[in-house]
Amino acid sequence: MSKTEQFKQEISKAFTYKGPSLILGAAKLNGEVLTDHFVRIPLKTMNRHGLIAGATGTGKTKTLQIIVEQLSAAGVPSLVMDIKGDLSGIAVPGDNNPKIQERHDHIGFPFAPDSSPVEFMTLSQDQGLRLRATVSEFGPVLFSKILDLNDTQGGIVSLIFKYCDDNELPLLDLNDFKRVLNYITNEGKDEITREYGSISSTSVGTILRKIIELEQQGADLFFGERSFDVTDLCRFDDQGKGYVSVLRVTDIQDKPKLFSTFMLQMLAEVYSIFPEEGDMEKPKLCIFIDEAHLIFSESSKALISQIETIVKLIRSKGIGVFFVTQNPTDVPKSVLGQLGLKVQHALRAFTALDRKNIKLTAENYPLSDYYQVDQLLTELGIGEAVISALDEKGIPTPLVHAYLRAPHSRMDILTQSEINQILSSSRIKRKYDEVIDRESAYEMLGAKIEEALKREPEQPVSTPKTSVGRPREEKSTFEKVLNSPTTRQIGRTVAQTLTRGLLGVLGIKTTATRRSTARKSSWF
């Protein structure tokens, strides 16, 4: 038996499954496309996360499009980041042409133009459903990590959240948080010191500067109401196709802090809301993070640790997370090790460092008797990739050089009129277009200060005396410790932490708690 025939047998056996699967293309060996030897990915392993990597112009975005449109057809909704603005074409059927037909003839797979139901979303002033979240929904721990605060500064953030909880002051946007920061160092300083202990004005100034930095990247548009309901990501059209939620973030590359803030909050919220499911026949939702390096390059070690934790745990909720980036080294090793599907497009070796990174990348893939991986990675053509996946039992498949099929939807952007038509037919856009500006911490504290200024100053309280007219004896050190504001605050903080909810380690509030708070206040 020739080596090619042996390879064909191995591929046919490894990529044949009992359950439904996605077809990415056909295997390729020694420059020959092996017609009818498809590279398949089991649908049930799409919650094991994945990576799509490769140099600019090698076909990463089209691979993402191939996967997402097949997920939609199988009834699996997706959330995708459209940073370059070329994913909107998934909403309309593609156009056949001689090059596409030639590619599909080689693969042995028919080209059938098709489209997917799409919902456009935005973090800025662009057209689409505006995604927002309140400061309260982040919780003190996650909010501190996003601001990259130290322990002392993070303690002040926890104090502010506790104070606002105790006094029913809704923290909705960054103006609310800044107002409370100002209050606890000025008009409310005595109240805070009496009830919670003294705070450092230097630390407060640092926190304020961090918030201003976040605002300069557009976070003031993100924080506020109406909060986005993550269950709206899991919608289906009348034909049972899963909706593709396209987040239009073409201006996000110069705002990495905002991007990482949104993605971490979204992942945490999805984790807290969705119930445990275990292994399912198909995932509930798949999230594709394009230009993933924008998350990790601006994240502290603590934040990366939180992302790693969520990626590990969210699989059991039936959620798959896929990172799309130029080089696998853009993703931390701790996260990279959690990814079951790896689709590697061509890498370019222009420098000694590039060659070193290619060798490191090749070591991330299973050993192969048919390919010299590090060399192959530099020789891949556009629309080709090296693929390693998991079979239905979670066992890694053999490494395969895949000649990828073309997307069935348009490989180009939509016109403005086409976008307007999709937006006008949205069933949920009206809900998120509604502007909500209810009374929150900013207005409440302003009213409190105004009321205090109208009062007459109270008479000084005389020093308590004993029965013989002498001042009371000073309390013992033990009594001071027991009755100190710091001790009382520690007790309250411990109690609150124990009841924070499923995602207490992140400080994320569940939807139920949130509602309660609301009541309170070119490929070819």
Image (cartoon, rainbow, N blue to C red):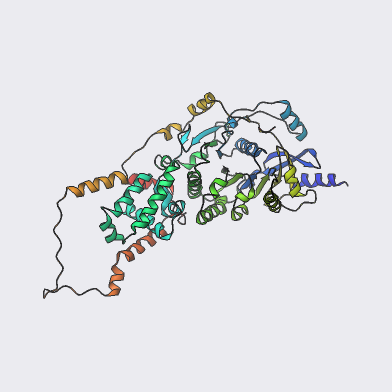
Residue 235 position, x and y percent, is: 52, 37
Outermost residue to the front: 351
Q: Residue at x 40, y 45 (%)?
A: 134
- Above or below, 465 against 383 in this view is below
Please tell me in which quadrant of the rendered image residue 350 appears: top right
Please tell me in which quadrant of the rendered image residue 385 appears: top right
Residue 443 position, x and y percent, is: 29, 43
Q: Residue at x 47, y 34 (%)?
A: 129
> Is residue 250 visible in this depiction of the protein?
yes
> Is residue 521 visible in this depiction of the protein?
no
Outermost residue to the top: 417
Left or right: residue 368 versus residue 168 is: right
Outermost residue to the left: 468
Badge count: 0
Q: Residue 21 versus residue 459: which sits nearer the camera?
A: 459
Residue 520 position, x and y percent, is: 32, 46
Left or right: residue 350 versus residue 459 is: right
Please tell me in which quadrant of the rendered image residue 309 appears: bottom right
Q: Residue 523 versus residue 95: which sits nearer the camera?
A: 523
Left or right: residue 467 versus residue 115 is: left
- Above or below, 340 against 228 in this view is below
Left or right: residue 140 versus residue 27 is: left
Q: Quadrant of the C terminus?
A: top right
Q: Residue 346 versus residue 20: which sits nearer the camera?
A: 346
- Above or below, 411 against 32 in this view is above
